[in-house]
Amino acid sequence: MPKTDTILSAKSLRYFLQLIDTMNYTQAAQILGITQPALTQQIKKLEHAIGAPLFGQMGKKLYLTEAGKEMQSAAVELLDTINSVVDDIQEFTQADKGSISVGVLDTIDIEIFRQFVVEFNKNYPRIQLNILTYNRQELWRRLDNNTIDLAIMYLPDNTKRDEINLQHQYDHMELFKDRLMILTHKDTVEAKQAYSISRFTRRKWVSYPEGSYLTQLMKDYFGDKNKPIVSLTFSKAKYLIETAQTTEYDTYISKSYYLAHKKDINLTPVYVKDDKDFEIAMVYRKGKVEIPRIKNLLEEWKKFLDKKDYSSRLE
């Protein structure tokens, strides 16, 4: 152990590498801010620990022995590892440095969050933000595997497993109370009024894919006896709307998406009578807020919405 402790001393390794740079004890000691005898003592300790000379001398010139060359490679690698660990610890403990990965449900429009990210980046340029979109299953998988720090998704979720996760493993922050909205060609309905789903059971639909959160909501509204007549599916609201507007199909999107893009929509927006509440939420593992940069991001998000709330930003 004494020999290992000596070899792995960061101070001894730095002294050793500095002497290699100058190949002169006096110059190396001056650069290090120590006396020449102190430097000589550290090098001798290293040589004693490994049992071989690190430097040889021809006349007044130093040269690196074969043992010294081996030790040089090891010293560079060890110090790189030490520095990397220190950087990682600093990233974990500092509020203005590091990286944050955010996963977003692929059916949620991220324009508001994009605006926030741009503002956040101006104030915290040393934090790298990675924004990625996933389907619901992949989003949960990455949260469970801790490969993303935060997720923007719809709640409550529709599966028992994920409800259990929310109760025991995760916290969440509500961003916006959302609502499913039908976009229809029917001329017998009034915009933004609520109607029984029975008014739409004979309609043909352009829909989100099977397994999508909003698709599951629509299936619940239709009930076991009826199924939506789906002709086409797309994963993006933009394509649902464009397709519906150029065909006779109806479609459905979230209220949040409608508010953000209503100037481009010429179908009649209506709600389902007695529809279910759901929200856009930021979901994260319990304990994530103990990481300063993530705690800082969540606090900055609250400040961002205090200036102008989510709903107002959508419109």
Image (tube, rainbow, N blue to C red):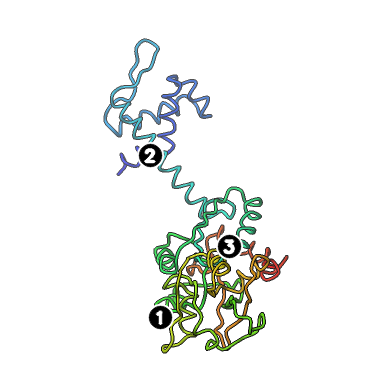
User: Could you say which is closer to the camera, residue 77 or residue 147?
Assistant: 147
Q: State the image coordinates of residue 115 (x, y, percent, origin top left).
A: 64, 58
Query: What is the CA distance from the residue labelled 3 to the residue labelled 2?
Result: 43 Å
Q: State the image coordinates of residue 256 (x, y, percent, origin top left).
A: 61, 71
Q: How many circles with numbers are drawn on the protein?
A: 3
Q: State the image coordinates of residue 56 (x, y, percent, origin top left).
A: 33, 18
Q: Amino acid at mark 3?
A: Ile
Query: What is the CA distance from the residue labelled 3 to the residue labelled 1?
Result: 27 Å
Measured along the vertical axis of the image, is residue 110 above or below residue 272? above
Residue at image mark 2: 78
Q: Quadrant of residue 178?
A: bottom right
Please give left or right for residue 177 compared with residue 21 in the image. right
Query: What is the CA distance from the residue labelled 1 to the residue labelled 2?
Result: 48 Å
Q: Amino acid at mark 2?
A: Leu
Residue at image mark 1: 160
Counting other residues with Cα less than 10 Å from the Cα at mark 3, is it few (<14), some (14-19), or many (20 or more)? Answer: some
Counting other residues with Cα less than 10 Å from the Cα at mark 1, is it few (<14), some (14-19), or many (20 or more)? Answer: few
Please give left or right for residue 240 compared with residue 210 in the image. right
Which numbered dot is residue 110? 3
Q: Quadrant of residue 295?
A: bottom right
Q: State the image coordinates of residue 165 (x, y, percent, origin top left).
A: 43, 75
Q: Earlier in the sequence, mark 3 or mark 2?
A: 2
Q: Nearer the viewer, mark 3 or mark 2?
A: 3
Q: Amino acid at mark 1?
A: Lys
User: Could you say which is closer to the camera, residue 281 or residue 173?
Assistant: 281
Q: Earlier in the sequence, mark 3 or mark 1?
A: 3
Q: In the picture, which quadrant includes the C terminus?
A: bottom right
Task: Check whether the beta carbons of the residues at disc 1 and disc 2 lie within 8 A of each other.
Answer: no
Please give left or right for residue 236 compared with residue 262 in the image. left
Q: Nearer the viewer, mark 1 or mark 2?
A: 1
User: Could you say which is closer to the camera, residue 24 or residue 271?
Assistant: 271
